[in-house]
Amino acid sequence: MYEVIQVRLRDAGKISYYSTNGLKFKAGDFVVVEADRGQDYGQTISEIEVILDSDVAEPLKKVIRKANPWDMHQIDKNKKKIKEVMDTCSKKIRERHLPMKLIDAEFTFDRSKIMFYFTAEGRIDFRDLVKDLAAAFKARIELKQIGVRDEAKMLGGFGPCGRVLCCAAFLKDFEPVTIKMAKEQNLPLNPTKISGLCGRLMCCLSYEHKIYKELMKGAPKEGDILKTEKGNGKVTGINAIKRSVTVELEDGNLIEVPYK
């Protein structure tokens, strides 16, 4: 059995399980962790858990320590250095006329590697760009092409609901979202109403879909004719949250009727 904790690398990196190495942490702690080469940093996003050996898919890396004041100073220095790094990378992209949009960049904790994130319409041959950047920064360089959803997650923002974007706040992974989910939640199929800042269907359609399916059980369909205490009428709207339907009576009046 392993005592583990979930850590999100850097500001918007991958979330993985790390061995606690016998140390104690709580959600929200900044920590220094083992990396493929050297060290990296991240923030714990869970409490300590115990998992079975059979649940470990690959060798677990360890949390080295809870970040101390010197570590936090180093992290802050790395973040301040990023603007200079991105300016240099943008310049090199323009010089080589590469059709790519630089989104963000990150240092590993020990500055042994710099990750650059970009979007592009198709595949980009950036081998010469990597050589330019490696020569300029004397570090290992990793360029990663991301999608528009990842771009929104990195840059953050506010959704139509007025809250911080789900992807930037708490979502670990992006799940498939379909237009059928919007239909089954009785939402208007207007792209501007059901799309997020990334231009894709809103993630909340996916994780709210199961609840709506439960709430819609037993509901009549729009257009069905219902017999009510006030006479027969046609269903013109469904409110899954209230578990009720709007019925237009033969005299034109609208009434709200619950369903079981």
Image (tube, helix red, strand yellow):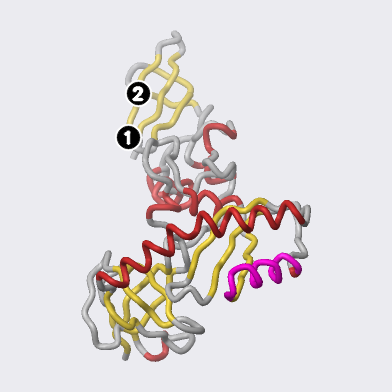
Q: Magenta stretch mostly in which secondary structure?
A: helix
Q: Is residue 251 above or below residue 76?
A: above
Task: Evaluate whether residue 16 shows in this view.
Answer: yes
What residue is pinned by disc 1? 242
Residue 118's mark? none
Q: Residue at x 45, y 60 (%)?
A: 12
Report whether 151 appears left or right of 160: right
Q: Residues within 10 Å of mark 2 (few under 14, many from 20)?
A: some
Is 227 placed above or below 128 here? Answer: above
**Pointers 2 and 1 in contact (C-beta within 8 Å):** yes
Q: Quadrant of the rendered structure where residue 180 is? A: top right
- Specify the amino acid type for callout 2: Glu
Gap between marks 2 and 1, in whole Å? Answer: 10 Å
**223 shown above or below 50:** above
Q: Is residue 35 magenta?
A: no
Q: Residue at x 25, y 69 (%)?
A: 69
When asked about the image quadrant of residue 43, the answer is bottom left
In the rendered image, residue 199, in percent from the top left (x then y), is placed at 59, 42
Magenta highlight on residue 137: yes
Residue 189, image x and y in percent? Answer: 58, 33
Going by the image, does 57 lie left or right of 46?
Answer: right
What is the number of the mark on residue 256?
A: 2
Q: Is residue 183 visible?
A: no
Quick one: label 1, few (<14), some, or many (20+) residues within 10 Å?
few
6 lies left or right of 139: left
Q: Which corner quadrant holds the C terminus? A: top left
Q: Report helix, strand or loop for mark 1.
A: loop
Residue stretch in magenta: 128-139
220 sits to left or right of 242: right
Report the residue that reaches farthest toward the top.
251
196 or 153, nearer to the observer: 153
